[in-house]
Amino acid sequence: MDQQRCPAAHPEDPTPCVGPVAVTVLDAVNAGANGCEHHAARLLASLERGRVHALPDAPAGAAIRTFTAAAGIRPFCWVDGPRTEPSQLSGIENRARQGH
């Protein structure tokens, strides 16, 4: 059986959705995708100047949970290989390197 995934799930990301579609992730030019908190956080972590907004029927705190999770996720985290450049690290890892 083919498992349907949310629009925020990257085609190369092998993980399943976790929970219902609850948020919209927008990029710097306001292009967006709705997604479950899991895939939305992974998408947000892979964008520069991305934003997240809860959908009207989202569980309380969905956007802040997504935003917080994204800070600890490396961009395109489903891609293997060494990650040493700032653009390849999570926001939390970059802040730690800068001593903040």
Image (cartoon, rainbow, N blue to C red):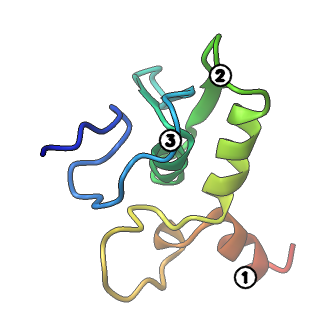
- In this picture, residue 58 sits left or right of residue 9: right
Determine the residue positioned at 49% across, 28% down: 21
Rate crowding at label 2 as few (under 14), some (14 to 19) or many (20 or more) other CA atoms within 10 Å.
some
- In this picture, residue 25 sits left or right of residue 57: left
User: Tag on residue 40?
Assistant: 3
Q: Position of residue 23 (x, y in %)?
A: 57, 27
The residue lying furthest to the front in this view is 1
Closest to the camera, between mark 3 and mark 2, is: 2
Determine the residue positioned at 57% across, 40% down: 49
Q: Position of residue 60 (x, y in %)?
A: 78, 27
Q: Amino acid at mark 3?
A: Ala
For label 1, the residue is 97
Between the C-alphas of marks 3 and 2, the distance is 13 Å
- Rendered-image quadrant of the N terminus: top left
Determine the residue positioned at 61% across, 31% down: 52
Q: Amino acid at mark 2?
A: Ala
Rate crowding at label 3 as few (under 14), some (14 to 19) or many (20 or more) other CA atoms within 10 Å.
many
